[in-house]
Amino acid sequence: MSAERARPAREPRRSHLSIPAIRLRSVPVLRYAGTPDDAEGTRIQNRGPTASPRGPGGGVGPGEVGNFIVTGHRTSHSAPFRDLPALRAGDRVRVHAGQTVYVYRVTATRSTSFRSQRSLAEQSAALPGRPNADPVRSMITLSTCATPEDHAAGNYWSDRFDNPEHRIDKVGVLVAELVVD
């Protein structure tokens, strides 16, 4: 099966994320209509799972061409992305959605600033980092707070949802789709 499908068969409301390199296993990913780290996304993360926005300003579902965005807490609320900054190029990310496991390979690390509209647009772009480019591949952006780094630099700014100024984003490309029973 091609790793460049335009749209997977009916995406379930909940999928599960596993990242072997940081010992993350089967963390729920809840989709919602919105943008990364908005009120609804923050509410979802505050309950412990990760959140995945859809629609204008959000991303696409797993396996779809474009940017599948998953956000999670790093320092609170079960901290599923506690060790996300340790991911390196080449590490694998698995997303189990319905009968399919999507395997992504990490290719890059980005920084996003909540105080920069351009930076936010780059994070949410269909082609991560390139807001006006058309996507041609299925990609993933895993995003978490840079609170420890911001605080170490003396930056205590936060938005109305208590997000720190900076996010650490790990970007990857889809390399395989596995059908499971």
Image (cartoon, rainbow, N blue to C red):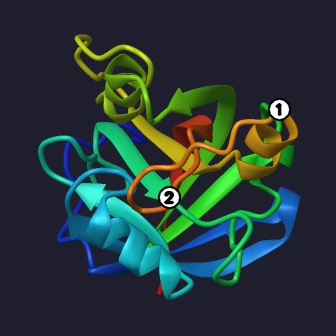
At mark 2, the secondary structure is: strand
Residue 65's disc is none
Per the image, the residue denoted by label 2 is 71
**Front position in the image: 151 or 118:** 151
**Residue 88, percent across and down?**
83, 36
Depicted 160 relative to depicted 65: above or below: below
Per the image, the residue denoted by label 1 is 153
Which residue shows up at 69% across the image and 73% down it? 80
Q: Is label 2 or label 1 in front?
A: 1
At mark 1, the secondary structure is: loop
**Front position in the image: 128 or 75:** 75
**Residue 154, percent across and down?**
79, 36
Q: Is residue 6 left or right of residue 51?
A: left
Q: Residues within 10 Å of mark 1 (few under 14, many from 20)?
A: few
**In the image, what residue type sits under mark 1?**
Ala
Which residue shows up at 44% across the image and 18% down it? 129
**In the image, what residue type sits under mark 2?**
Thr
**Residue 150, percent across and down?**
74, 39
Where on the picture, by quarter, is residue 40?
bottom left
Depicted 12 relative to depicted 84: above or below: below
For the residues labelled 2 and 1, the Cα–Cα distance comes to: 23 Å
Can I make out residue 45 in this image?
yes
Q: Is residue 163 left or right of residue 152?
A: left
